[in-house]
Amino acid sequence: MVALLADGGGSLDWSLVSAVNGLAKSLPSALDSALAFMGEYGVPLASVLLLLFAWAWARRGKGAPVAVAGLLWAGLASGLALLLNVPVRAMVQRPRPFVSHPGGLDLLMSHQANGSFASDHATFTMAVAVGLMLVDRRLGRIGIGLAFVEGFLRVFMGVHYPSDVLGGYALGTATVLLLAPVAMAVLTPFTHALTRTALRPLVIAAAGAPLGHAAAAQPQPSGTEEPPHHLAA
């Protein structure tokens, strides 16, 4: 399998990248540039923003410490998956399609000729998506949609074979799911502990604070009348 990837992945992989990249020739150059920018920067940034939105939302719900722990793992797992991809690239040493087939593709953005398998962009976006799926399925579906768009754009740009993208999806998914039990066993007590510190707002939004904490922040009634017992407490 490694030898097949190193040789360029076979005729099917090349036929697919050639066909998808060929769509760029029928599109305006400005649109090609915009899609290339989205594939290089836009979609990964959208995945990060989706993760931040999920964190802001999770802080206001019930069971916030557990949900925040899951989102923290999604972020950490995406970074870990990228690190794991370093030895994978070094082992496979697969040339990118524009290197294996010089002049055969319309390269939409200049790119260094480093290893092609697996795709970092696909690995990162899918790891974020699967991590989100473990916390909230609706946001997870959006994340998976972004990962699929990213995978298509990397092939469209001529910088990856489809199997590079599939390999990235597999690496990102496996990293999140296989290590999730251990990660959550560590991160859940950690986020619960944060709720007892000055960093509590990172886990639980102010609006979700317990009644006793919210009431204690209210001004006490004027005069000699004693405040109600639950406020005094």
Image (cartoon, grey):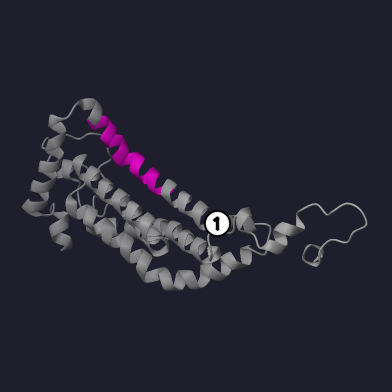
Q: Is residue 34 magenta?
A: yes
- Residue at x-position 41% and y-position 56%: 79
Q: Is residue 163 rendered to the left or right of residue 180? A: left
Number of numbered labels in the structure image: 1
Magenta-tinted stretch:
32-48
Q: Amino acid at mark 1?
A: Arg
Q: Is residue 169 magenta?
A: no
Vertical position of residue 82 compared to residue 108: above or below: below
Magenta region, mostly helix, strand or loop? helix
Tell me residue 173's x, y (percent).
32, 62
What is the x, y in percent for residue 232?
82, 64
State left or right for residue 227 relative to residue 21: right
Q: Which residue is mark 1?
A: 60
Q: Residue furthest left?
A: 11
How far across and down, in percent of the image, does residue 165 sit?
23, 53
Q: Is residue 110 visible?
A: no
Q: Secondary structure at mark 1?
A: loop
Taking the spot 27% from the left edge, 58% from the top edge, the residue there is: 169
Residue 39 falls in image quadrant: top left
Q: Taking 42 as reference, is 93 left or right?
A: left
Q: Compare residues 44 and 109 and report the one nearer the observer.
A: 44
Res 175 quadrant in image:
bottom left
Rendered location of residue 70, percent (x, y): 46, 63
Q: Residue at x 26, y 55 (%)?
A: 118
Quarter holding the C terminus is bottom right
Quadrant containing the N terminus is: bottom left
Q: Is residue 59 visible?
A: yes
The residue at 29%/51% (across/down) is: 145
Query: Quick one: label 1, few (<14), some, or many (20+) residues within 10 Å?
Result: some
